[in-house]
Image: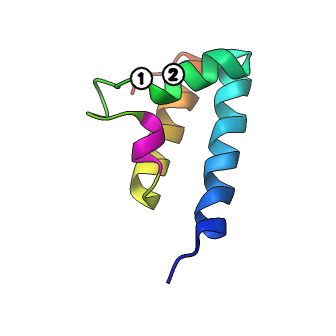
């Protein structure tokens, strides 16, 4: 059984990665809460599963390094 604290740690890491990618908490929060065409959902909601979290991290990496998703 997964506890809320076990889920929160990867979410916190994702938020930190988004802040690093976008340069501010405000911009990171906006991106995480906005519907993403590639994901078909908001990044923050996708990050509730391990597979979704991996996909969101891939997109953030692509944004940071100019790669293709």
Give the Cα separation between the discs numbered 1 and 2: 5 Å
Q: Is residue 66 above or below residue 18?
A: above
Residue at 51% of width from left, 21% of height from top? 31
Mostly what secondary structure, the magenta segment? helix
Residue at 58% of width from left, 62% of height from top? 7
Image quadrant containing the C terminus:
top left
* Secondary structure of residue under mark 1: loop
Asked whether the beta carbons under mark 1 and mark 2 sit within 8 Å of each other, the answer is: yes
57 displayed left or right of 46? right
Q: Is residue 16 above or below residue 53?
A: above
8 displayed left or right of 62? right
In magenta stretch: residue 44: yes
Residue 19 occupies which quadrant of the picture?
top right
In magenta stretch: residue 40: no
* Secondary structure of residue under mark 2: helix
60 displayed left or right of 55? right
Residue 39 occupies which quadrant of the picture?
top left
Q: Which residue is mark 1?
A: 34
Residue at 58% of width from left, 75% of height from top? 3
Residue at 45% of width from left, 54% of height from top? 48
* Of residues 57 and 2, the one drawn nearer to the viewer in this rendering: 2
Point out the stretch of residues depicted in magenta: 43-47
Please rate how many residues cluster around mark 2, counting C-alpha atoms within 10 Å: few if below 14, some from 14 to 19, many from 20: some
Q: Which residue is mark 2?
A: 31
39 displayed left or right of 30? left
User: Given the current orientation, which residue lies at the most extreme front position?
Assistant: 4
The location of residue 55, given as percent across then percent down, is 43, 43
Residue 26 disc label: none
């Amino acid at each position: 059984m997964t506890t809320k604290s076990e889920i929160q740690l990867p979410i916190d890491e994702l938020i930190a990665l988004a802040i690093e990618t976008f340069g501010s908490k405000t911009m990171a929060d906006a991106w995480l809460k906005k519907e993403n065409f590639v994901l078909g959902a908001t990044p923050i909601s996708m990050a509730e599963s391990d597979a979704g979290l991996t996909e969101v991290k891939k997109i953030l990496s692509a944004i940071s390094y100019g790669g293709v998703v």
